Image: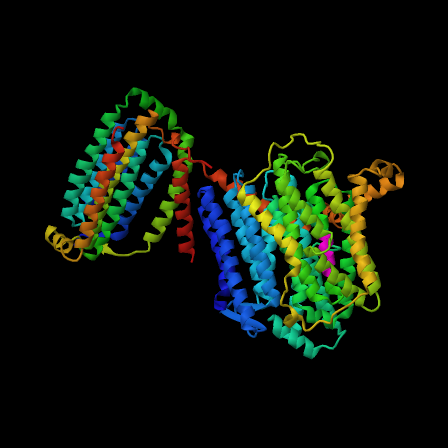
Amino acid sequence: MQEFIWLLPTYPLLGFLALVLTSGRLPKNIVAIIGAGSVGLSFLTAAIIAAQFLASGEDYFVKEVWTWMAVGDFTPGFNFYLDGLSLVMMLVITGVGFLIHMYATGYMADDPSYSRFFSYMNLFVAAMLMLVLGDNLVLLYLGWEGVGLCSYLLIGFWYTNPDNGYAARKAFVVTRVGDTAMALGLFLLFAELGTLNIQDMLHAAELEWEVGNGLAVAAALLLLGGAVGKSAQLPLQTWLPDAMAGPTPISALIHAATMVTAGVYLIARTHILFELAPSVQMLVAWIGLITLLLAGFIALTQSDIKRILAFSTMSQIGYMFLALGVGAWSAGIFHLMTHAFFKALLFLASGSVILSLHHEQDIFKMGALRKKLPVSFFSFLIGSLALTAFPFTSGYFSKDEILIAAHGLEGPGMIFFFGGVLGAFLTGIYTFRLFFIVFFGESKAAHPPEKEYGGWNMNGPLILLMILSLVGGFFAIPLDAVFGQHEEHHVSTLMHGFMIAVPLIGIGISAAFFYFKIWSVEKLMASSLAQTLHKFWHSGWGFDWLYDRVFVFPFLWLARINKADLVDGFYALIVEISRAANSMIVKTQTGYIRWYALSIAAGVVVLITVGVML
Amino acid sequence: MESIPVEHGLILAAILFSIGLIGVLTRRNIVFVLMSLEIMLNAGGLAFIVAAARWGHAEGQIMFLMILTLAAAEVAVGLGLIIQMFRRYKTVDINVLSEMKG
Amino acid sequence: MIALFYIAAIIAVIATVAVILQTNIVHGLLYLILSLLAVAVIFYVLGAPFAAVLEAIVYAGAIMVLFLFVIMMLNLGQHTRDQERKWLTPRGWIAPSIMSAILLGQLVNVMRQIDYDIVPAQVGVMEVSALLFGPYVLAVELASILLLAGLVAAYHLAKTK
């Protein structure tokens, strides 16, 4: 059955083709069956393959399908590589992907572009599977760009609103910055090591480069550039909040569970390269730490339910980067998996809330939804608990591992540890701020919901994701063979208690503010310092403002002053000459037959003259 | 023995051809234009007959027959066009057919 | 015989000039028939009696009668003749005449260099026919198809909608 691993991306690709070629002429229930069914088939196949792979006890498995191209020594193939890492990724993508597809069959039910939506979704799943299963960096890059394209298409899915188109372009351009760096990294690796097959490349790197080699540092830095762009980390994080313009299932699938974690996957996949460049690995940790803190502060001030979750995603990916940076590879991937469960749950539940309130996204116009939306309420409760690493939920185990690993690191380890704990504290506050404001207090909704939106196809995935968010921490993921035996870190019981207590204190503060109303937000906001900070954080630490001034405006200015440039002038001249010649020739076309006869006679005269003279 | 210089016959053909050309270029009445075209075709036929006589062959006459056929077909189509044009424009002025000007 | 050639040539030229100068179409047509008959005489003098007969019957006969029919159908009266007078301004003749004169000059200039005298010898119907239905039978077929096409086109074009 492992032979059939190529079927995984093929099912959704066929689904995409079927939906695209019929271009919306199929009835909605058939679209839903094709769209969700193809991913479901992929998941079934993936589950069987995973069971067989684990039973076989092999470390890895390669399936060569065909050679993509052959140029000299450069022969990347459509080859699939399965090991513990890609196994986890493929199960998350197909499993969570299938649940989200199912949810989307209900969520998008009233959308006129139903078929287009599922065609993009299927293409996305196919590209994402190509990304994680490819055995060489070229195939990975194909998937990488494929998911970028789908992300663009789906953010701008409701393209009639120009703002959505703008958000889509922003996401595309900002990630393109990272992708360019990554492409350069691939060129460098191929030029230096002569192969882009990931395993061969890593072995060659180990043999040829000693730790700290300049080329290794450069290659790792360039790959990190790509990862940072895709995973919305500092300094390329600005696109993710705007990406929430897309439909909510998209936010769940692409901008929370799968695509944005591709950067984490890339670094984990090429971890040997990063181990050869310790300075870059340290940079990864710093990027993760700073991003998780920045995003946490921003999330405190947001009022749009999806934007809060977006910044929370950014922050959680920061944790993954932190884990990668401190060398806790499997902890990073573990957190990737649990995060996929609970963040997908939170996004989908927020989708139910938004639809029940007739497309209301402002949390201050919600409130008291606990009784009216029970499924969303429990989804949010469990998702929030997992997100804040409440003991024995899935998030607790993964975040715990990361923080313990950070604690065990020499040098700046303690900074990472306390930074991470501070991040967890912030997570507790902003998550339960959202939770209490939306589900408790008084109803401030413009259109209070009569009943919860969605049938079994929307609530079923929510319930499954709830279970996964609760028990996901007990899954043992087979990563030891990929990253080598990792040493067990231990912290004192006191430290451990501190780690558990801090998020709970955050929850408590949140409850004090927003549930018990012991403290008042208004009083806190009265001081001008608080207002300034709020404004600053609300704007995302002013990154958009800064990038607009540093990059966008100068670029637009350059474009404007260069509008009538020399090269253009040259081409404009050609156009002008053609126009002038045209208007001259047009004058000869009088439409009079006798004029044409005269021209013919004149031509004959000229020809005979020439003939006689020669 | 009586003889005719070849160039005299050819020059006669050239003169008739030129007169026909003047007619085509000058007249605005489309019937006259068609008649002038007939003159030009006939001049071409004359040139072939002269050439045939110069070599004493029959091929020139065959070419004349071809031109004759061509002229007959052309006149049939041309006159059909004139009738159609007269029906639509109620005139034989060739200048009304100038809608194709650039 | 030679005198006949030159007389016929002069008649042909004069009649042809008269054709293009006419304002009355029917008169012009009659001059054209005269010109064609003169050319038929020339054909005969040059030893092509078959061509001469065809010129008289088909050209001066059939084709010109076709013209006549059409002119009658169009029923162009006094109005057209006045219009013709208006159209034929002296200035309109200048450019075409110069053009044709140049062309004629060039042609004459080229033909002057030929120096050969024709001794007319009869090439009769038999020789022509033998060639027509021998090596040139394909040309005859093509000519018949051309006439058929002309027939169909003329029928279609002249049809009232």
* Furthest residue toward bottom: A207
Left of A500 or right of it: where is C11? left
As drawn, C82 above or below C49 = above
Total marks drawn?
0
Using the image as rendered, state which of residue A374 and residue C87 is in the foreground.
Answer: A374
Percent across and percent down for residue B62 are 19, 51
Using the image as rendered, state which of residue C68 and residue C50 is in the foreground.
Answer: C68
Q: Tell me which residue sits at (32%, 52%) in the image.
A: C111
Q: For the C terminus of chain A, give its image quadrant.
A: bottom left
Percent across and percent down for residue A172 are 65, 51
Percent across and percent down for residue B71 are 24, 42
Q: Is residue B23 magenta?
A: no
The scheme the figure's colours follow is rainbow
Range covered by the magenta-colored residues:
A313-321
Determine the image quadrant of residue A267. Answer: bottom right
Residue A573 visible in image:
no
Magenta span main SS = helix
Q: Tell me which residue sits at (25%, 38%) in the image.
A: C153
Percent across and percent down for residue C124 are 12, 51
Determine the image quadrant of residue A245. Answer: top right
Residue C92 visible in image:
yes
